[in-house]
Amino acid sequence: MEMDATLVLMGSFRPHSRVSLFSGLFFDSTALLPISCHHPHSPAAPPLEDDNLLSEILLRLPSEPSSLSRASLVCKRWFGLVSDPGFSRRFRLHHRRNPPLLAFFDKFHGIYSAMEPPNRVPEGRFSLQLDDGEGARFLLIGCHQGLVLSRHRLLNQLLVWDPVTGDQHRFARPLGFETLGPSVHGAVLRAAGDVHHFQVVLVRTEISEQHSRAIASVYSSETGIWGNLMSTPLPPKASNSLLLFPPRINTVFPGVQVGDSLYWLLSGITAGILEFDLGRQSLSVIHVPVDIYARGSSHFTVMRADDGGLGFFFLSRFTTQLWKRKIDSDGVASWVMGRTFEIDKLFSLNSLKWGGVLTIRGFAEDNNVVFLSTATSLFMLQLESLQLKKLFDTTIVGFYHPFESVYAAGTGIGGGHGGPELLHNT
């Protein structure tokens, strides 16, 4: 059965009213009735009977996984347009800067859906499959821009994987990073303006009796080589820190991209953020906005602020502070308090029932979502709307890596599907 094309595009509307269609495109609703599903036979055919124009409208459907699947059920003409590989590529590129939060991984590549049906990712769709059966030997380092970076537990190998397309790229670590110990971290990024190539940034801590320093190197998939090593000294350990180890990169929390820079937390010191500037190819250290060790039990992470700049999420029991890094007219940077709120009061929750404390378990930078856990459950908090969602009950302690990307479920008409299929970016 063919679906009503107008309902797919607009949901519902009042006749003879003026409606908005995707990204500011406006049409009179009467012009959409009826919409033909046949190819035009005349140059004077109505605008929506022009395949090129219709493709541009369909391109602006929401980025949820079910959007193209629903559109494909309207008629064979729509099915032909949205199932074309070229359209699939354009759809992913169009929504690339604002991808939905599809799922989240644990470090062993176990995946958990973050969406409800019909947008829930099918079980096993994003499971890591390697021809040599070595998938279980790779540990996840981080996710960025729809790519996953992992390291082999035993071999001198890194793996970059696109779960949507299935593309995989294995390569050796650089000199100076042969041993991936507890002080090594990294991030993967798509090359600017290029969907086919990527960059990997590895950072590690080098500790000596005199001082500690952070070291970085960048890999380009376009050239297949690692760049020169870069370094910057790390501040000394804070006198009031309860941590016994020297200052080092915190490998529990993934790096966060803000603009042209990557940021990692540093542990054991009061100056707590390591910045890698991709454009300048340089490292530097930024102080955090609060005295972390003076607050007792607290949790914190680097984040992308609501204005797109560098932010800092600080949590002490249920008290939350959101900070922003601002640069004044003289070029001087400083931290400014954005918002503060009490999570348990905001949602009228019983803190004792929650286990008495919240812990940060992940941050989805494109969707501004933080993952929080109690002693018994995992939650998702959207920081703009302050909407809290319980994901599931768990007593497992671990960090989660949000996977934000554009994925389209299968396209088809009627009952011809055996299940959701992937629109490959080929």
Image (cartoon, helix red, strand yellow):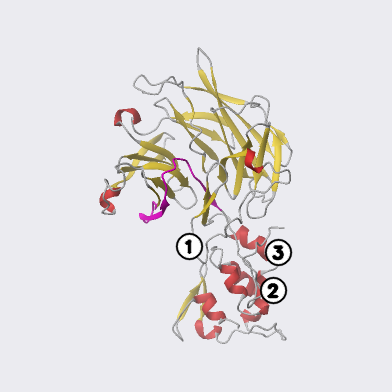
In three-dimensional space, the C-alpha distance between marks 2 and 3, rounded to whole angstroms, equals 10 Å
In three-dimensional space, the C-alpha distance between marks 1 and 2, rounded to whole angstroms, equals 27 Å
SS state under label 2: helix
| Residue 352 x %, y % | 26, 45
Instruction: Please state which amino acid type lies under the numbered disc 1.
Output: Glu
Q: Is residue 395 magenta?
A: yes
Q: Which residue is mark 3?
A: 85
Residue name at image x 65 percent, y 46 percent: 161
Q: Quadrant of residue 58?
A: bottom right
Looking at the image, which is closer to me, 163 or 75? 163
Q: Quadrant of the N terminus?
A: bottom right
Instruction: Please state which amino acid type lies under the numbered disc 3.
Output: Pro
Residue contact between numbered discs 2 and 3, judged by CB atoms under 8 Å: no
SS state under label 3: helix
| Residue 184 x %, y % | 56, 29
Query: Residue 80 — which label?
Result: 2
Q: Counting residues from the N terminus, which is met first, the one under dot 1 or under dot 2?
A: 2
Vertical relation: 365 (above or below) 9: above
Q: Which residue is mark 1?
A: 116
Vertical relation: 298 (above or below) 25: above
Residue name at image x 54 percent, y 75 percent: 9
Residue 328 is at least partly visible in this image: no
| Residue 303 x %, y % | 44, 43
Residue name at image x 67 percent, y 65 percent: 87
Magenta-drawn segment: 381-404
- Residue farthest along the top direction in this orientation: 209
